[in-house]
Image: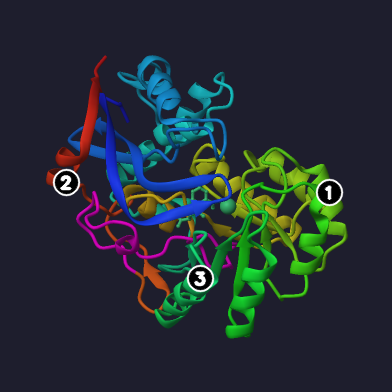
């Protein structure tokens, strides 16, 4: 399949809610949207990087530069028989997995459309609907948190994840657990603590959390292994896992018992599937994380979540929770906490061209 051209856009979309994590507050997203063109078909991928390197190192600007000046010139005008060969061509480029993932993911969409099959079938998925939960940002009060959990539970979401940070942790979990004794409840610290604060986690260990996500440094495995040895609650790694090798090392070290797989964080669907396979070999459950994606990114997440080892509810809740209007035409909505995987070839969504045009801040087209 020959990549005839590529188009890269910068979109700006206002979020419907204020999303606070231990690393900052988001009220809108700046989203890179990549389209690859071949033979009348279009393949799409969405960037998950933020303006600032607060989650991991990549940013919108670093990805824009790298894609426009380095990565896309290496693939536009070239033919690739399959996604593996495309990944091979980009292998000399170190790091920057979120940027590289966009090219791989858009190519998967294009390739699946060329074959006329949904992406999940090519990935080897086993289900057509995905159980999901919500990720609740840090709220302005305990009462507001309990109310937000109440709403999510009433809507049928299968799990609630609370963002925590130093000073906003044990009391909020205690309040929510007291009100919802049977809820599938988790916390995500986004790397805000060190081992010196282990008493927080010893306390959280008593609340029957399904897992504790990324308590310690964004690039750490060793201290997570030390913390895990002191807890009965499994740790779940997010930021620390950038590759299948990281997953193997984390599981060998017993740094976690669960992995949050984000396709862009590990460099694309092939790497995400390998992380999934390694976790399965260790008997570790995985789930599909989210990065506040719009419709293109959410569709990719849903297709990945069809793999057998994704046994815990993911973060791909209804698109309408996030956006007044989405960039795709298809509604990606949960019903009783379950989102159908978009049917149709590739990722199964089409761009809402009016919305995309309206929210575009910059665009560049690359031709051979
Ligand atoms: O740590 O999972 C995270 C959003 C941005 C950056 C990091 C994270 C998140 C979320 C949101 O938790 C998940 C979602 O609703 O898409
Ligand atoms: Mg996380």
The picture places residue 218, in percent across and down from the top left corner, at 67, 41
Residue with the mark numbered 1: 196
Can you give x and y, in whole percent of width and height, for residue 68 in the image?
A: 35, 19
Q: Residue 337, how many percent across, how many down?
A: 43, 75
The residue positioned 40% from the left and 38% from the top of the image is 47
Position of residue 285 in the picture relative to residue 143 (left or right): right
Q: Residue at x 49, y 56 (%)?
A: 124
For the record, the magenta segment spans 306-333
Question: Is residue 330 highlighted in magenta?
Answer: yes
Q: Earlier in the sequence, mark 2 or mark 1?
A: 1
Mark 2, residue position: 355
Give the mark, 3 or 2, whose residue is nearer the N terminus. 3
The crowding category of the residue bearing disc 3, from other C-alpha atoms within 10 Å (few below 14, some 14 to 19, many at least 20), is: many
For ligand 1, tell me if the residue under mark 3 lies within 8 Å: no
For the residues labelled 3 and 1, the Cα–Cα distance comes to: 27 Å
Asked if marks 3 and 1 touch (Cβ < 8 Å), the reply is no
Q: Name above or below for residue 244 compared with residue 133.
A: above
Q: Nearer the viewer, mark 3 or mark 2?
A: 3
Q: Nearer the viewer, residue 166 or 56?
A: 166
- Front-most of 92 and 45? 45
Give the residue pinned by disc 3: 145
* SS state under label 2: helix
Could one spot residue 180 in this view of the protein? no
- The residue shown at (77%, 46%) is 194
């Amino acid at each position: 399949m020959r990549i005839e051209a590529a188009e890269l856009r910068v979109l700006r979309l206002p979020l419907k809610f204020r999303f606070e994590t231990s690393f900052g507050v988001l009220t809108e997203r700046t989203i890179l949207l990549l389209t690859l063109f071949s033979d009348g078909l279009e393949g799409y991928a969405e960037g998950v990087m933020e303006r600032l390197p607060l989650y991991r190192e990549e940013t919108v600007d670093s990805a824009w530069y790298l894609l426009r000046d380095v990565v896309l010139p290496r693939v536009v005008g070239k033919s690739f028989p399959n996604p593996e060969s495309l990944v091979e061509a980009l292998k000399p480029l170190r790091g920057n997995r979120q940027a590289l993932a966009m090219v791989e993911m858009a190519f998967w969409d294009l390739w699946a459309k060329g074959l006329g099959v949904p992406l999940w079938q090519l990935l080897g998925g086993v289900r057509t609907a995905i159980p999901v939960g919500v990720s609740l940002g840090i709220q302005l009060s305990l009462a507001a948190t309990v109310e937000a959990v109440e709403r999510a539970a009433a809507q049928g979401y299968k799990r609630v994840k609370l963002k925590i940070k130093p000073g906003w942790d044990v009391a909020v979990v205690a309040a929510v657990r007291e009100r919802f004794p049977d809820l599938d409840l988790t916390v995500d610290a986004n790397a805000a603590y060190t081992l010196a604060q282990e008493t927080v986690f010893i306390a959280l260990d008593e609340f029957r959390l399904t897992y504790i996500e990324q308590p310690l440094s964004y690039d750490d495995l060793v201290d997570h292994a030390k913390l895990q040895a002191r807890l009965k609650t499994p740790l779940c790694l997010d930021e620390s896992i950038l590759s299948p090798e990281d997953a193997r090392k984390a599981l060998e070290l017993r740094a976690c018992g669960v992995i949050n797989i984000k396709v862009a964080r590990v460099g694309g669907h092939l790497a995400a599937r390998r992380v999934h396979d390694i976790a399965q070999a260790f008997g570790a459950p995985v789930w599909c994380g989210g990065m506040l994606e719009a419709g293109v990114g959410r569709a990719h997440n849903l297709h990945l979540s069809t793999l057998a080892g994704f046994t815990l509810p993911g973060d791909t809740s209804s698109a309408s929770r996030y956006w007044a209007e989405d960039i795709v035409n298809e509604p990606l909505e949960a019903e009783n906490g379950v989102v159908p995987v978009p049917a149709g070839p590739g990722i199964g969504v089409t761009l809402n061209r009016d919305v995309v045009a309206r929210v575009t801040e910059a665009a560049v087209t690359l031709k051979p």
